[in-house]
Image (spheres, helix red, strand yellow):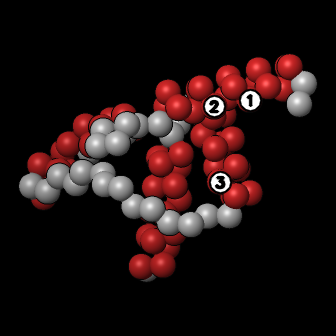
Amino acid sequence: MTQKTKSDAASMLESMAQRQPQRGAEPQETQVSLQANNQESKQTNLQERATTFSTYLRPSLQKRIKRLALELDRTTASLVEEALEVFVARHEE
C-alpha cells in the first residue's frame, strides 16, 4: 500500500467514524426526519425512536453502502433505513 493510499484510507475511515452515531445516540438524520414529520406525529400521537437492528450483508454490499453514504454525506444507517422503507412499502401494497 502506498503512502497516499494509506492516507486516503485513513481519511475515509476517520470521516466515516465521525458520521457514525455513538451507541445509544440517535442519528442526526433521524432527529431531522422526526422534526420534519412533527405534524404527522402530533396527529397520531406516536413518536418512533430509532433502535439498533443488525443483519448480515455481503462485504461488497457494505462497501458500496459506505461509499454511497460518503458521497451523499449521510450515514449508512439512514441509507439502509430509506432502502428498507421503500422495499417494505412496495411489498405491502
Q: Name the residue under label 1.
A: 9
Distance CA(mark 2)–CA(mark 3): 14 Å
The one of 91 and 76 positioned closer to us in this rendering? 76
Depicted 36 relative to depicted 85: above or below? above
Looking at the picture, how far across and down is residue 56, in whole percent? 56, 66
Q: Residue under circle 2?
A: 13
Identify the amino acid type marked 3: Gln
Contact between labelled residues 1 and 2, with CB atoms less than 8 Å apart: yes
Name the residue tied to disc 3.
62
The outermost residue toward the right is 2
Q: Which amino acid does label 2 sit on?
A: Leu
Pointer 3 local density, CA inside 10 Å: few below 14, some 14–19, many at least 20: few
Q: Measuring from the top left, give residue 31's x and y in whole percent.
A: 30, 37
Residue 26 appears anywhere in the view: no
Distance from disc 2 to disc 1, alpha carbons, whole Å, reads 6 Å
Quarter in which the C terminus is drawn: bottom left
Which of pointers 2 and 3 lies earlier in the amino acid sequence?
2
Mark 2 element type: helix
